[in-house]
Structure formats: structure tokens, C-alpha cells
Image (cartoon, helix red, strand yellow):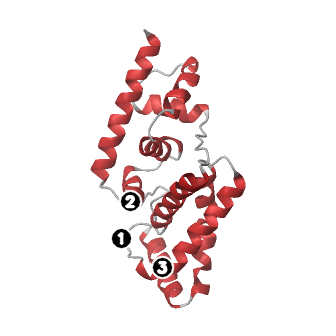
Amino acid sequence: MSFNPIYHHTEAQLEEELRWIEAAKLNPEAFRPLYEKYYKAIFSYLYQRMSSKDTAFDTTSQVFLKALTNLKTYEFRGVPFSSWLYRIAHNEMVQVFRKQKEQRVVNADINDLKFICEENKEVFFEEYIPYLKKIIGKLKEKELQLVEMRYFEKRPFKEIAEILNISEINAKVRMYRIIEKLKVSIRKINV
């Protein structure tokens, strides 16, 4: 069985994780394996989007505190526990941006930008880089979030849908519309 280590788990991994969750529901100290497994990933997710490392650390702490506090409401849906954590992380991040007026950042390297073009069968030219960064930076928050998850973090649509609490088809349709918007902007560069 092949699986994407960013999202997919084997049945045995999902079962082990479910045992950890059930144990943590009874005893908060049993939450440790989940914390240790996902702390770095959640921190990276937040730090990738925030201008301050301290704010990312604080927000990551809030994510795990909320997860532990609300663990009794968690329902297993056949996907890794991380999907629920990412949803909490996203909501916490939005709160930080609202409260602190923190500047939203976009961290992308040349390979991320190249991947957008390649996956969408567009020719990539290095001179596109400043334009792509500018265009991506002007996307609405929900659009930017989709681009980041799909192209910068290489998440499958199923996971994106789980994190955003939307259907997989909806995630694909939204992504298609964003890509069309990017293509139009890139074509304007070439004119």
C-alpha cells in the first residue's frame, strides 16, 4: 500500500493514533504522543504564514491547548488526527490576524512557483517569479490558503477539504478558479 506521508496513514497508523486519542480522552497525560507527532508540523504550518516566530510558537501552543481541551468532541473520520489540528491551527491563525493586526506573509521558493506552472501545464520562466509572487500576494485569504496547501505544502485535495471542512469537489473547483485567475494574470505579463 502506497501512501503520502504528509497525509495518508496506513490502517495500522490510523488505529494506533485512534488508541492514543481514546487514551487521551480518559487521561490528558496520554496526549503526549499526539503532541510529539504533530508539534513540528503545526508549528511549521503557522510559521510559514506568520511574520513572527514568537507569534507562531504562541499560536501553536494555543492549538494544542484547544485540541486537548476539546478532545472529547473529536470524532474519528478515517483521516489522521492532524486534519483536525490543522483546522484548529487555521482558526487560531485567523484570530491572531484579527486581534493583533499581524501581517500575513507568503513564504514560497522558486520550486513552489515552478510547481504551480508545471501542474497546470503552463510554461515556467524565471522572469515570472516576481510577478507570480505579486499576484499570489494579492489573492484573497481563502484563495491564498488553498494555493499554499496545494502547491507549497503539496497536500492532496482530500486533506485540504478535511482541513477547510468542505467537500473534496469544492476544494478542486475553488482551486481551478484560482488557477484560472493566475493564468489570466500570467498571460497579461506576456502581452
Name the amino acid type tagged 2: Glu
Q: Are marks 3 and 2 in contact (CB under 8 Å)?
A: no
> Which of the numbered marks, if any, corresponds to residue 77?
1
Residue 153 on image: x %, y %: 52, 47
Q: Mark 3 points at which residue?
A: 71
Residue 45 on image: x %, y %: 58, 54
Observer-nearest of 144 and 29: 144
Whether residue 29 is situated above or below residue 11 in the rendered picture: below
- The residue sitting at the top extreme is 191
Q: Which of marks 1 and 3 is in front?
A: 3
Q: Do the residues labelled 1 and 2 touch (CB within 8 Å)?
A: yes
Name the amino acid type tagged 1: Arg
Query: 10 Å neighbourhood of mark 1: few (<14), some, or many (≥20)?
Result: few
Which residue does the image show at 35% across and 70% down from the upper left? 77
Name the amino acid type tagged 3: Leu
The residue tagged with tag 2: helix, strand or loop?
Answer: helix
Which residue does the image show at 53% across and 53% down from the upper left? 98
